[in-house]
Image (cartoon, helix red, strand yellow):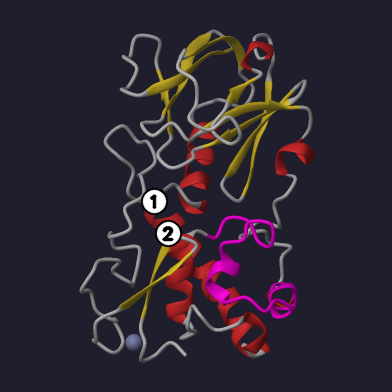
């Protein structure tokens, strides 16, 4: 699933490709209904022709295309990706939406390919409405380690599912939560209010390091077309190898797994307490 580093890489790619400043000419949407009317929906695209892109923002895994009137929300869901294509390039398989854009005299398309069709494309009235329900972004420079510790320390749930709660901090996904908890030797099932302030501050730093390291990794490994690399939880950006039978890089004993809300957690029973 595309997580914060992948989505931020996608945002930067769209900026590089000249999406900011361009104008929507036409939008083609596939006819099939979305599996989920709530988050998987495509809505409001008929209002896009004639609108100019003012900026591209992101909070957590949510991209906001700020227009001269309204905002277009893009969410990649489980399997979505966006490619910028020249007018004559063929559309990829599983294309759900094809945006035709024009920047000065050059025409191009932005296509959302989404095999599992959980991605979301929807027009909102304002940035506030698109980001409502999301906490501060995990890489927000204004979010301090102390604020993170303060927000987390009041909660009694295990730390792992808390880190995935997008209303608390937006953008920490399953694999990066496991990576950060391993870095600071905190068990995923420790109750948040039982973790010392010092450890929470260290955890805040480890989350940033894991996400920034992944972002750098993606930037330096583009695909053959110069497009952002797509997530692979087993590549070199991670210290934890998320595979049954893999080992703790510190203790060299097999990692254990646990499930929180259906998501598999990898951790080391020996060094994470
Ligand atoms: Zn270990």
Q: Are marks 1 and 2 in contact (CB under 8 Å)?
A: yes
Q: Up-down: is 87 above or below 41?
A: above
Image position, residue 94 (x, y; %)? 35, 24
Secondary structure of the residue carrying numbered label 1: helix
In the figure, is residue 253 to the left or right of 118? left
Image position, residue 206 (x, y; %)? 52, 75
Image position, residue 159 (x, y; %)? 57, 76
> Residue visible at 39% across and 90% down?
271
> Residue visible at 71% across and 65% down?
143
Mark 1 crowdedness (10 Å alpha carbons): few <14, some 14-19, many ≥20? many
Q: Is residue 186 visible?
A: yes
| Alpha carbon separation for disc pair 1 and 2 | 6 Å
Residue toward you, 196 or 118 = 118
Q: Up-down: is 2 above or below 150?
A: above
Numbered tag placed on residue 218 in the rendering: 1
In the figure, is residue 89 to the left or right of 14? left
Image position, residue 173 (x, y; %)? 50, 58
Q: Which residues are magenta?
A: 147-172
Q: Residue 115's image quarter?
A: top left
Residue 256 lies within the magenta run = no
Numbered tag placed on residue 214 in the rendering: 2
In the figure, is residue 259 to the left or right of 130? left
Residue 149 lies within the magenta run = yes
């Amino acid at each position: 699933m595309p997580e914060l580093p992948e989505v931020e890489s996608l945002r930067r790619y769209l900026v590089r490709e000249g999406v900011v400043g361009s104008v929507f000419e036409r939008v083609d949407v596939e006819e099939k209904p979305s599996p989920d009317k709530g988050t998987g929906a495509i809505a409001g695209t008929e209002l896009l022709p004639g609108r100019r892109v003012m900026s591209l923002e992101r909070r957590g895994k949510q991209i906001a295309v700020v227009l001269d009137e309204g905002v277009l929300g893009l969410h990649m869901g489980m399997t979505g990706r966006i490619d910028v294509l020249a007018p004559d390039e063929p559309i990829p398989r599983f294309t759900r939406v094809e945006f035709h854009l024009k920047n000065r005299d050059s025409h191009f398309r932005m296509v959302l390919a989404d095999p599992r069709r959980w991605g979301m494309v929807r027009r909102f009235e304002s940035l506030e409405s698109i980001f409502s329900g999301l906490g501060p972004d995990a890489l927000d420079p204004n979010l301090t380690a102390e604020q993170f510790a303060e927000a987390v320390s009041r909660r009694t749930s295990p730390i792992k599912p808390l880190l995935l709660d997008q209303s608390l901090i937006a953008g920490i996904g399953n694999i990066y939560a496991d990576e950060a908890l391993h870095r600071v030797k905190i068990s995923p099932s420790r109750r948040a209010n039982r973790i010392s302030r010092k450890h929470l501050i260290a955890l805040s730093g480890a989350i940033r390091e894991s996400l920034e390291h992944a972002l750098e990794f993606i930037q330096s490994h583009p695909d053959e077309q110069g497009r952002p690399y797509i997530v692979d939880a087993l590549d070199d950006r991670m210290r934890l190898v998320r595979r049954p039978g893999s080992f703790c890089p510190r203790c060299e004993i097999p990692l254990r797994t646990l499930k929180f809300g259906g998501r598999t957690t990898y951790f080391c029973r020996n060094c994470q307490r």
